[in-house]
Image (tube, rainbow, N blue to C red):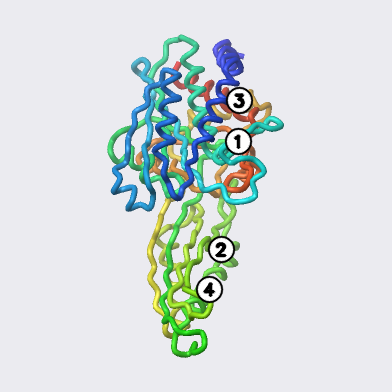
């Protein structure tokens, strides 16, 4: 083993209790999105980083932009660590925003409680864990005291749940960063180089309200919405016949995640709103996908006389495809992942969509790697009792620190 790698590992082991306390402090500040009041978490993170000697630039997104987006506050953070001339600038990005905890928790979702080697809390695995991974990997690298080239940037952002445009997208759009390489929050047992795209739409079905005692005087928007829902869900049977060539990604899928409408039980509903999520495999064309869904909705609506339909796009997140130039990241992470975890670390795709696409769209080669289990399901991400196995945090931090050393020393 390389002596520098041994020293990195030893430093991480010696400071691991401190790293766990840092992650607990991050979990203990809620970042439920919605409502999306995330500036307080950014301020707390900046204070903790400053305790480590890392000055954090605070980049608040203007309040009007945030409100128009449907959130309350966003402050994105950049920590810049500059070394010698001649090497790449490697950015490490993790997001702090997260869906609300929901029901069924056995542990306090904001407690950071530890039980049987697992740390529990909303965002413990996705993705505050990698605030800790990346911060302590960078600290370990600098502890060596050896000459380094290039630099490291920590990007801690707060808009992944709504699409990233006011997180990394905002930083990149305003020219606040242009790294040469990127590692973004992920799990420990694979290096992810591709992911699905996502189209989200809002469909509002308008009918005509009426008293339930005289329903023929109205037009039932809910019955019209059911026609549309049936047509949309029939598409999933067709999607299952399409298979992605990317390992880890199966087929397209459509989900209706929210339905709102009606005024009372004795009133024929005059308006019903559906919100849908269509996952696109990397091989699909987003414009063609959107046009196909519009056609399905319009044809279904035409079969129910009296209703009209408004359709609004909420989000279009492109898929991630491997960008030429990511090979140094992939090679280093795989090599050190196998050494630390004792098993091969494959490259794969993921059915999720992430902020990484925003960097790649601007020409930054990127991969997804961080602390976590083999699958999203195992972590309970977006479900009750989300958790992180602490040994995965320790080992992923070693892998990232060694990778940074290979790229910058």
The location of residue 35, given as percent across then percent down, is: 44, 49
Q: Are marks 4 and 3 in contact (CB under 8 Å)?
A: no
Q: Are marks 2 and 1 in contact (CB under 8 Å)?
A: no
Q: Which of the 4 image quadrants contains residue 85?
A: top left
Task: State whether residue 300 is above or below residue 162.
Answer: below
Q: Name the residue tied to disc 1.
A: 372
Q: Name the residue tied to disc 4.
A: 231
Q: Secondary structure at mark 1?
A: loop
Asked whether residue 71 is in view, the answer is: yes
The location of residue 4, given as percent across then percent down, is: 54, 12
* Dot 4 alpha-carbon crowd within 10 angstroms: few under 14, some 14 to 19, many 20 or more: some
For marks 1 and 4, give the one nearer the viewer: 1
Q: Name the residue tied to disc 3.
A: 394
Q: Name the residue tied to disc 2.
A: 239
CA gap, disc 4 to disc 3?
48 Å
Camera-side residue of 349 and 206? 206
Asked whether residue 296 is in view, the answer is: no
Q: Secondary structure at mark 3?
A: helix
Q: Which of the 4 image quadrants contains residue 168?
A: top left
**Which mark sits nearer the N-terminus, 2 or 4?**
4
**Which mark sits nearer the N-terminus, 2 or 1?**
2
Residue 256's disc number = none
The quarter of the rendered structure image containing the N terminus is top right
For marks 4 and 3, give the one nearer the viewer: 3
Q: Secondary structure at mark 4?
A: helix
Q: Are marks 1 and 3 in contact (CB under 8 Å)?
A: no
Residue 200 is left or right of residue 332, and the answer is: left
């Amino acid at each position: 083993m390389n002596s520098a790698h041994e020293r990195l590992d030893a430093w991480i082991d010696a400071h691991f209790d401190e790293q766990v306390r840092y992650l607990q402090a991050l979990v203990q500040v809620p970042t439920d999105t919605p409502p999306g009041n995330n500036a307080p978490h950014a301020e707390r993170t900046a204070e903790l980083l400053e305790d480590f000697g890392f000055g954090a630039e605070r980049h608040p997104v203007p309040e009007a932009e945030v409100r128009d987006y449907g959130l309350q506050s966003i402050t994105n953070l950049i920590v810049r660590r500059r070394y010698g001339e001649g090497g790449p600038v490697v950015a490490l990005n993790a997001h702090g925003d997260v869906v609300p905890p929901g029901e069924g928790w056995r542990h306090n979702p904001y407690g950071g409680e530890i039980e049987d080697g697992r740390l529990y809390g909303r965002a413990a695995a996705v993705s505050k864990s990698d605030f800790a991974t990346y911060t302590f990997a960078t600290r370990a690298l600098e502890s060596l005291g050896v000459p380094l080239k290039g630099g490291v940037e920590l990007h801690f952002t707060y808009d992944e749940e709504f699409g990233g445009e006011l997180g990394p997208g905002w930083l990149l759009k305003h020219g606040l960063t242009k790294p040469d390489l990127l590692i973004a929050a992920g799990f420990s047992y694979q290096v992810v180089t591709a992911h699905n795209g996502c189209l989200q739409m809002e469909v509002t079905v308008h009918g005509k309200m009426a008293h339930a005692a005289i329903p023929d005087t109205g037009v039932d928007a809910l019955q019209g919405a059911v026609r549309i829902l049936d047509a949309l869900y029939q598409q999933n049977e067709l999607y299952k016949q399409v298979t992605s060539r990317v390992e880890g990604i199966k087929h397209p899928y459509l989900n209706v995640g929210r339905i709102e409408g009606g005024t009372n039980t004795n009133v024929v509903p005059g308006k019903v709103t559906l919100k849908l999520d269509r996952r696109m495999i990397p091989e699909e064309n987003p414009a063609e996908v959107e046009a196909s869904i519009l056609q399905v909705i319009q044809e279904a609506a035409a079969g129910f006389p009296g209703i009209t339909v408004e359709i609004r796009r909420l989000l279009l997140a492109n898929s991630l495809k491997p960008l030429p130039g990511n090979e140094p990241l992939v090679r280093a992470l795989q090599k050190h992942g196998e050494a630390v975890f004792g098993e091969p670390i494959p490259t794969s795709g993921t059915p999720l969509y992430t902020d990484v696409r925003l960097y790649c769209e601007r020409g930054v080669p990127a991969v997804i790697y961080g602390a976590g289990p083999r699958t999203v399901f195992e972590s309970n991400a977006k479900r009750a009792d989300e958790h992180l196995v602490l040994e995965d945090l320790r080992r992923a931090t070693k892998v990232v620190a060694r990778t940074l050393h290979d790229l910058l020393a």
